Image: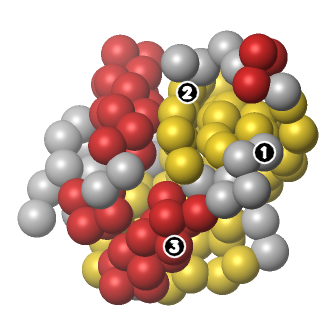
Amino acid sequence: MKKFPAPPFNEETAKLKVQMAEDAWNTKNPVEVSKAYTPDSEWRNRTQFINGRQEIVDFLTEKWNNERHYKLKKELWGFRENRMAVRFEYEFQDKNDQWFRAYGNELWEFDENGLMKKRFASINDMKIDEHERKLT
């Protein structure tokens, strides 16, 4: 399976890959999102370690069940050959109606087919009031 654009990336294709990831995550469709990753993809998400597409689907299903009104924005920070550094922020409302903005950085590594084989994310949450939202 191929997921274009594939490495080696240039600035245009790296930005496109980041936008495609942002668009996919904003669908909140775990199965579709998982198709961008290798079958044996390795993740570190905060302190959680996730391996393979099924664990990705399970993780994202739980995430989006708990993070209502989820909205994400990603930005390319750098790239080289088959790797990227991405900055992101997202907002969500938890089950207690508290709003949050999460800030983070991801390191991505892709295989030759353009599927992500490694995703390491560091994320911090900040409580916000609804009127402070900026991603709508």
Does residue 7 appear in this view? Answer: no
Quarter holding residue 57: bottom left
Tell me whether the residue at label 2 lies in contact with that at label 3, contact meaning CB atoms closer than 8 angstroms.
no
Q: Secondary structure at mark 3?
A: helix
The residue beneath circle 3 is 62
- 34 with respect to 105 (left or right): left
Whether residue 51 is situated above or below residue 42 in the rendered picture: below
Which SS class for mark 1? loop
Type of the residue with mark 2: Lys
Q: CA distance from mark 3 to mark 1?
A: 17 Å
Question: Which of the pair 98/3 is nearer the observer?
Answer: 98
* Residue name at image x 58 percent, y 71 percent: 43
Q: Looking at the image, tell me whether mark 2 or mark 3 is earlier in sequence order.
A: 3
Q: Secondary structure at mark 2?
A: strand
Distance between the alpha carbons at the discs numbered 2 and 3: 20 Å
Mark 1 crowdedness (10 Å alpha carbons): few <14, some 14-19, many ≥20: few
In the rendered image, the quadrant that contains the N terminus is bottom left
Q: Which residue is mark 2?
A: 73
Q: Mark 1 or mark 2, which has the lower sequence index?
A: 2
Q: Answer left or right for 16 relative to 130.
A: left
What residue would you read off at disc 1?
A: 98
Answer with mark 3 or mark 1, whichever residue precedes in sequence: 3
Out of 31 and 110, give the one closest to the viewer.
Answer: 31
Position of residue 56 in the picture relative to residue 72 (left or right): left
Say above or below: 81 vs 121. above
* Residue ID at (37%, 50%): 28
Relative image position of residue 79 (x, y in whole percent): 56, 33
Crowd around label 3: few <14 · some 14–19 · many ≥20 (10 Å)? few
Crowd around label 2: few <14 · some 14–19 · many ≥20 (10 Å): some
Query: Residue 99 at x, y = what percent?
Result: 75, 39
Residue at screen point 66% across, 82% down = 49
Q: What is the spatial separation of the Cα atoms under label 1 and label 2, in whole angstroms?
A: 20 Å
